[in-house]
Image (cartoon, rainbow, N blue to C red):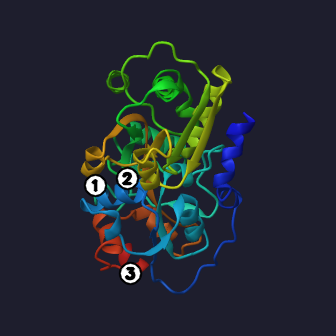
Amino acid sequence: MRNLLACIVVLSVLVPFAIGCGQSKPTSDSSIHVYTRSDACGASETWAKYLGNYKQEDLKGTAVYGDPGLSEAVIKDALGIGYNNIGYAYDTKTGEQLAGLRVIPIDINENGKIDNDENFYDKKATLVQAIAEGRYPSPPARDLYLATKSKFSGISKEFVRWILNDGQKYVDDMGYIKLPNEKIEQQLNKLGQTEPGIQMEGTITISGAFALYPMMIRWGEEFQKVYPNIRLDISAGGAGKGMTDALNGMVDMGMISREINAAEIEKGAFWVAVTKDAVVPVTNRSNPFLKDILTKGLKKQTFIDIWITENISDWRSAIQ
């Protein structure tokens, strides 16, 4: 357990924003301060795809590293807007929206208001239920994957198998969404049979998506209770880093929070879906236009005009 907990140091940046940062005071200015991610990540790719099959590089805004960094940037900016994986928009323990952040409701039916069946953002549990029931759009809801080069083998393969079987019972508790039984069977078949003569000891190295990191930590803790002679070295740095590390043989598996692209498949990428979550748009809780934002929501086209075309740069225009 000590070895596993040591790896949490790589994300020590998570702690400050989770327990509260200094809030910006409301301002008479109404300009939108747009934030995006600087690191190659699944959250950006997923958000860009939701906006219209765009790529991460199409997203405009001030670039910030990592989910924790983007959350903190919006928390400190009363006029800020960003996007986060749900694990970084809600408190893991309480399920409440993080202090300083408010998730922006999506006006899915585009009628200019958030109807009762669109109003599921207050707590993480209600959003997770909406994702599971397909009421939240997909994308930005998406599968999360573990990837390697060629095939999983040895103790890494057994860890993935354990995740798809026993590990699913921890998913709800962590605020992720279980895979349907049919999909689990598909992933197990893809993974292949247990290899004979495996000694359950050694080290499994993992890097990649911030989105999957908290779930992997929990899975790692539970897996080590069953197999105490296995050490897990888990670090986050974005889905792009996870895939690069996996394909270059620097880690046993990468955590991926987006679809696997053709170039990666050509390089031998092999992947298995393990759970599901979503990306959500966020703003500051002191945003002077928050009441209208929460009541009316924002339409997809408004998000496009904020992040892609930059036709909207003012909160008053965004909530018309």
Which type of secondary structure does the marked residue at label 2 adopt? Answer: loop
- For label 2, the residue is 115
Q: Residue at x 68, y 24 (%)?
A: 228
Q: Looking at the image, is mark 1 or mark 3 nearer the viewer?
A: 3
Q: Which residue is mark 3?
A: 313
Foreground pick, 269 / 217: 269
In-image side of 33 versus 228 (left or right) = left
State the residue at coordinates (66%, 72%).
23
Residue 182 versus residue 295 in the image, above or below: above
Labels 1 and 2 touching (C-beta < 8 A) = yes
Q: Which of marks 3 and 2 precedes in the sequence?
A: 2
User: For this view, does 300 lie left or right of residue 240?
Assistant: left
Q: Is residue 140 left or right of residue 233?
A: left
On the image, the x and y values in percent for residue 180 come to 37, 27
Separation of marks 2 and 3 at Cα, in angstroms: 26 Å
Quote the CA–CA distance across marks 1 and 2: 9 Å
**Along the line of sight, the residue nearer the viewer: 255 or 114:** 255
Residue type at tag 2: Asp
What secondary structure is marked by label 1? loop
On the rendered image, what quadrant is the N terminus found in?
top right
- Label 1 belongs to which residue? 109
Q: Position of residue 130 (x, y in %)?
A: 41, 41
Q: Is residue 173 something one can see in this rendering?
A: yes
